[in-house]
Image: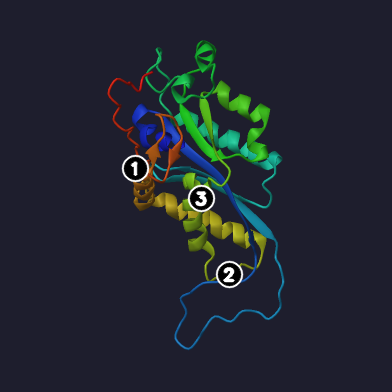
Amino acid sequence: MIERAYRLGEQLDLQVWTQDEAGPFQAIPQPGPAWQPEQQPVRQPHEYVRGGTAKLLTLFRPATGEVRAEPVEHATNAVLHPWLKRELEAILATCPPAPSEPTPGRRWSDWDYHPDAQRLDPYLPLLRVLLIWDNLKGHLSRPLMRWCVERGILLLYTPIAGSWLNMAESVQRILVHRALTGHHPQTVGELMAWLAATVRGWNAEPTPFEWGGKRAQRRQRARERRHALGRSGAFTCRPIRHRYAPPARKGYSHDK
């Protein structure tokens, strides 16, 4: 379903966003190369002093490359949920109004949200946003889920060990690399300022992401190598050898 959202969501006039929390990042010397004048290498302090940690709350729209992010010291529900609501309200304000009649992809049942989704469609607003994120306990909060459903936001959760399905993690790695690699933030405030400046620089010329690539091609080839069993969801990685019955004797039939 998440792969379908990446491939078809924007074509159905639905904004597809991904969300994640990066970090924690420490205010200590960060490994990596740095630009320095010749014969003046970077010198790190011999004291190992931890200046605190920070996290980066991130919303990422792969189709346009837009990033909505905020560095914070803590990412508890008391911090994460109000920020999510503010940003999602701003995103909904940029979405076109929902059509008066349901169109393909706008109904909850179009995404197999629930076995009885067809019964819920008359009582729920049409979809406007698809939000992909991991299944943290804070993301399963009933008040937050209800708030999203009432505004036409469909929540798609990545499975366990399925973080590769979340594009927000990819853009976070790029942002953190640009902001911190080879540098030494002294305080949490400096660390957060560098992360925020990097996000602003990214949004000045964002790079759209597309779902697919070599990994998707490898997965497709792996699926093609599988051999379906009885038209079900089961498969085997080894072909099944067909055993043919010997010819029936004269006067006998295999059907008996």
Q: Nearer the viewer, mark 3 or mark 2?
A: 3
Q: Which residue is mark 2?
A: 30
Q: Is residue 99 visible?
A: yes
Q: Quadrant of the C terminus?
A: top left
Q: Residues within 10 Å of mark 1 (few under 14, many from 20)?
A: few
Q: Residue furthest bottom?
A: 39
**Residue appearing at x 37%, y 20% in the figure:** 104
Q: Are marks 2 and 1 in contact (CB under 8 Å)?
A: no
On the image, which quarter does residue 54 sit in?
bottom right
Is residue 42 rendered to the left or right of residue 186?
left
Whole-angstrom CA distance, mark 1 to mark 3, is 28 Å
| SS of the residue under disc 1 | helix
* Between 231 and 122, the one nearer to me in the picture: 231
Q: Which residue is mark 3?
A: 169
Name which residue type carries label 1.
Answer: Glu
Residue 123 appears at what percent x and percent y?
A: 54, 12
**Residue appearing at x 41%, y 30% in the figure:** 230
Please say if 74 is above or below 88. below
Name which residue type carries label 2.
Answer: Gln
Residue 205 appears at what percent x and percent y?
A: 37, 51
* Between 39 and 158, the one nearer to me in the picture: 158
Residue 27 appears at what percent x and percent y?
A: 65, 65
Name which residue type carries label 3.
Answer: Glu
Whole-angstrom CA distance, mark 2 to mark 1, is 44 Å
Q: Are marks 3 and 2 in contact (CB under 8 Å)?
A: no
* Between 6 and 159, the one nearer to me in the picture: 159
**Residue appearing at x 48%, y 24% in the figure:** 112
Q: Which mark is residue 224?
A: 1
- In the rendered structure, which disc, 2 or 1, sits on the residue that comes first in sequence? 2
